[in-house]
Image: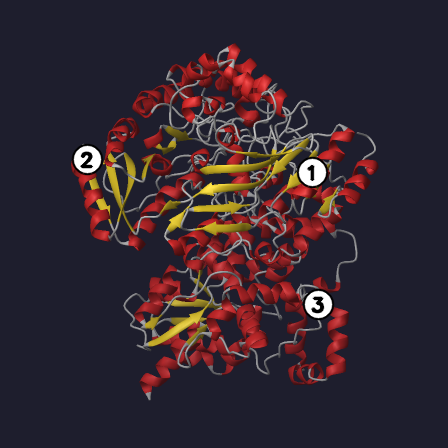
Amino acid sequence: MTDLRPLEAELRGAVRGEVGFDATSRALATMDASNYRRVPLGVVAPRDADDVAAALAVCRAHGVPVVARGGGTSIAGQATGTGVVLDFTRHMNQLLSLNHEERTAVVQPGLVLDRLQEAAAPHGLRFGPDPSTHGRCTLGGMIGNNSCGAHSVAWGTTADSVRELTVIRARGDRLRLGRDWAGAPEGLRQLAEGELARLRTGFPDLPRRISGYALDALLPQKGADVARSFCGSEGTLGIVTEAVVRLVEAPRARALAVLAYADESAAAEAAAGLLPYGPLTVEGMAADLVRTGTDLPRGGAWLFVETGGADPAEARARAEAIVRAADVMDALVMSDPAGQRALWRIREDASGTATRMPDGTEAWPGWEDCAVPPPRLGAYLRDFRALLREHGLRGTPYGHFGDGCIHVRIDFDLLTTQGVARFRSFSEELAELVVAHGGSLSGEHGDGQARAELLPKMYAPEVIALFERAKALWDPDDLLNPGMLVRPARLDENLRFAVLPREPVDVAFGYPADGGDFAAAVSRCVGVAKCRTPALGSGGSDVMCPSFRVTGEEEHSTRGRARLLHEMLAGEVITDGWRSEEVRDALDLCLSCKGCRSDCPVEVDMATYKAEFLHHHWSGRLRPAAHYAMGWLPVWLGAVARTRTARLVNSLAGVRVLAALAKRLGGIAPEREIPGVAGETFSGWWRKDGRETGGSGPTVMLWPDTFTEHLTPSVGRAAVRVLGAAGLRVSLPPTGRGTRVCCGLTYVSTGQLDRARKVLRRTLDVMEPVLEAGTPVTVLEPSCAAALRTDLPELLPDDPRARRLADTVRTFAETLEHHAPDWTPPRLARPVTGQTHCHQHAVLGDAADRRLRQAALLSGELSGGCCGLAGNFGFEKGHFEVSVACAEEQLLPAVREATPDTVILADGFSCRTQLQQLAGVRGRHLAEVLAEGLEGDEA
């Protein structure tokens, strides 16, 4: 269609939900978690089944195809399309009812799996299938792909858990699908009964056969189950608007046996023999996916076998019985829940590790989940590895060994003609290999575009013809997700990388992990959407993605922003490049918390991408006032210190009218208070009194960051006191002619990267003597430490001094641990609460802090999430509500629940400011708490 206005207008008039034909809406739906990309005409978020029917009617009248989309985590491309996308996550996302006596639930297609699990758990129930994307995948998507997960050996696939489906066909009729031909469209029963022999013999008999239509579910001996046959149809037959699903009893206790084998094939060959013992899972992985230092039993490959029981003793006994029956090199059994979580985390980390080769090369989906009969798995894996070597490819299999289903990501070259040709030839040969072992091209994620073209290698021509006839009965006009399963698109068409620029774009950061290529950095996002998890993960220690958890909007997720940047580079949907307002608006609510740098499985760093974008977007133009007011904060505070006008500035800020004017001119949120400036800077105090407080041991240099220097010098004074008590000699950076060191953080966060580089080069000049002496640098402000460790070497990749300074940076706790290991901190014996700084979580790590708190007898855990202030973010006009909502997720509730003797820890200036302004609570840096403890000891 060349003129989309009539289609858009009719949809807006027909449905009550949102209709988006704008560039942002379309760009966000171009990709799922696969290698493929299709640009839709528009996106509709239906409010109910009537909206779905109305949208289908309009699209049918215009001859426009329709694609149903849930969480967008499909790995084979079936959640993308060139027509109208129906997004069920916005409105049709409810659990309608749960009957714990009948063990059923009624759900809408956009309901996220974890929300169902949370509702079922109090009744001792759960939904059986549990894909790794359980925190963001939807029930509708699971039905469309017939998803499985780690527990399928116990509870089967989604099709095994579906009782009834309410479906709307493309021509508008509504059907309620079930057993005994319930809801079958006209002609389906006649088609099946005329092909009974083919239905009995034409389909491989294995637990993870997901490929093709499940027409054999229509056999009389299988209950003529129309709902089951619909599962796995990938949105090509009808649109699910409601489902009745079966729940299973969750074991009251679990145990985990980790079985070690010499190699992957030995583990694979052993897996099938464990099934008679009734395990809940039989997961496998090899040593090349395991990070060093893990507590796994010795071996080259492992099976993770989970058992259940009425109590821990019964669960453990079952696990121990499996260990006795297995022929293993070594084994361990864990019944402690925390220990099990730690071991499972090793297995779950494999999915992230698999996206990158050991040398950093990217690996891609495409053959993510083939399945073979479990007894054939060992032989298949040997042949699979041989085929990889033959094609010069690399990939590390892992997955559901008990079901014969293997996950793997392969280092395909999907950018060059030769690489794409090899992708095709490998795919064709692998399909033949899978079929030779009696397997299914898909064992979990569906065929989509990645494998549907190869279905004739798995099924006889007569069965393929049967698929086409079934599709014609359900969807005569071929409007529903065309190009999938029947008359499929070629597997090497519509590749998402084809539209990216062939030459690296000119950028400011070095992107060392991506070869200096911004497009490669953006392409890191493979779409698994961990950033779309609406609640913090187990233990609440993660950070990503705070703005999405507040707004629930895709464009405010890390994935959504990466998609918009991808489309900006592609230039088809977003056509104005770095000047794009769509990208600017999506990045506006990015807090630059860097949580994605650690929490994202592929380490997308949206804070860096945001700084890069703002650098180009505002180049040569007048910037927002906040960029000058807060981006240049070191300059303004330095001027106040030089002119000794802190008292005057604070007085003026206390006058309501003047403060309001200053905030308006500076682009600062009117709800915010302007922090007070210290009357004496930290370095000023140091020159007068601080030099005499240090110890006589090794020298450490204390970094006078802008916040410590001008706003909270008490933190610096406390740090000097503690470091000196630990026997360390403290120094400050050499300065001369008014030159001061600066990490450049405020310039980076506002995208003023030319200015940041200038400041950082000047800083390196000042620090050169310190670098030559090899003196460690202690940085008290976590955001400044993170900037020095990451932003500095990436902004100045050609200056070797940048890397040297980055490598010398230590946090306060790391300094004490590394350079005063024998020092014993004061025993404070008090509970603590607060929040680990986002940048410390993402870049610096907090292990040393945990150990220091433990040594000081400070008990309790700090929360995850983000304080919401995040430097300049929470101060900027228009961000106040989101900032507060972020704080309300974990930080403020934790502080409100604290007892009067609880220490509120907050190492970051932003975190302390947020606590003071929103809760009236004084948060303290760990150095301040320890310094007070030292004073108490002396008293």
Can residue 429 be seen in the rendering of this structure?
Answer: no
* Residue type, numbered disc 3: Ala
Q: Position of residue 377 (x, y in %)?
A: 33, 24
Query: Which is in the foreground here, disc 1 or disc 2?
Result: 1
Can residue 389 be seen in the rendering of this structure?
Answer: yes
Q: Which residue ends up furthest to the bottom in the rendered image?
A: 939
Report the residue marked by disc 2. Answer: 329
First in sequence, mark 1 or 2: give its number.
1
Classify residue 591 by image quadrant: bottom right
Q: Which residue ends up furthest to the left in the rendered image?
A: 324
Marks counted in the figure total 3
Query: Which is in the foreground here, disc 2 or disc 3?
Result: 2
* Residue type, numbered disc 2: Met
| Residue at x-position 39% and y-position 72% | 729
Q: Secondary structure at mark 2?
A: loop
Mark 2, other Cα within 10 Å: few <14 / some 14–19 / many ≥20:
some
The quarter in which the C terminus is drawn is bottom left
| Residue at x-position 40% and y-position 56% | 122
Report the residue marked by disc 1. Answer: 53
Q: Position of residue 797 (x, y in %)?
A: 56, 46
Report the residue marked by disc 3. Answer: 629
Question: From mark 1 to mark 3, how far is it between C-alphas?
Answer: 52 Å
Q: Is residue 939 above or below residue 776?
A: below
